[in-house]
Image (cartoon, helix red, strand yellow):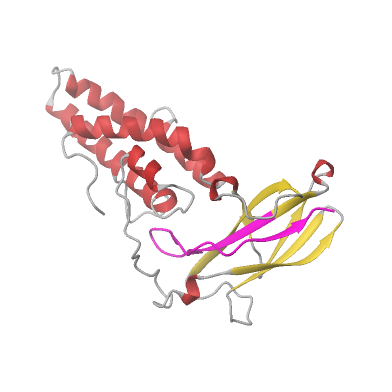
Amino acid sequence: MTDFIGHSDADFDAWQENFVIKVNLYKATWGLSADALTEWTFLTVTAGDKKAEWVLRWATVKSGEFTHSDVVFKNSARHSYESGDINNPEDTSLRMFINRYIRYNPLVSDGQKADIGITIPSEQRTPAPGVDGSNVMREVAGQLLKNEHLFQLSQVNTPGVKSLAKGTGVDGIEIFIAITPITVTVSPAAKEYAFDGESKGGYYKRQFDDGQEELKAWYKARKRFKGRTKTWGPFSKPWWGVIS
């Protein structure tokens, strides 16, 4: 990863403070899952963990009144908060969170990436492990199969592949939804879609509330690939159905 984080502790502290403020400003539009939001809370809010430990240890050293042990604790706190344990998939850190949920998230704009202080990735991305380098197997498509009272059933699969299995190296297929008035005839902007769940066995079931009758549900899907660092394929073309 390009080292967009300053080397000195002072630069790191300024960067992380801006990063946390700006992510909190934008994250509601990024379609983050409940697990991702829980991870963010643990990383930046939970007392005594990660960010809190760094702030405490850095304040001691920054004051000018410190011991060698204080420096050791400060270095450990920074490493845990900034990088974490890359061999532990249950751990988290700023860099891990960026790679898992921000860096290749199509709902995060280039302008937002610049504002939160991370490198904007090249359009040429390395294919996920086990995925056809042609990018074909990264794609996914959906179509509405059933539309009953307050219920819709969609089929989600890899274009050109009869099997409804997720595919080699695929960890899950994420579904995003946007609900609009029935008069809307073009797909909403990307920021209007929110993460809604994952397809199971090639299908996605969606139950609606009474107050959503006569609205239009728009869907998009994308593949999430296995690996120490999560990566995603492109979003599918949208499909939709009127909620009856």
Residue 61 visible to an observer of this rendering: yes
Name the residue located 40 percent from the left edge and 30 percent from the top edge. Answer: 21
The answer to whether residue 72 is left or right of residue 102 is left
**Magenta-colored stretch includes residue 222:** yes
Q: Nearer the viewer, residue 132 or 122?
A: 122
Q: Please report the residue visible at 54 percent of the width from the left and 50 percent of the height from the top.
A: 190
Q: Horizontal placement of 92 versus 151: left or right?
A: left
Query: What's the magenta region?
Result: 218-244
**Residue 205 placement, left or right of 235:** right
Residue closest to the eye, 177 or 49: 177
Quadrant for residue 212, please give it. top right
Check the image and report above or below for 231 versus 163: above
Give x and y (percent) for residue 112: 40, 41
Determine if residue 49 is in view: no
Quick one: quadrant of the N terminus? Answer: bottom left
Q: Position of residue 90 (x, y in %)?
A: 43, 51
Expressed as whole percent of the image width and height from the top left, the position of residue 155 reads 69, 69
Residue 187 lies in what quarter of the image? Answer: bottom right
Taking the magenta stretch, the answer to whether it contains residue 127 is no
Q: Is residue 98 above or below residue 203?
A: above
Look at 45% across and 53% down and name the residue there: 105
| Image location of residue 129, percent across then percent down | 39, 71
Between 38 and 145, the one nearer to me in the picture: 145
Foreground of the two, 5 or 108? 108
Residue 179 in the figure: left or right of residue 68? right
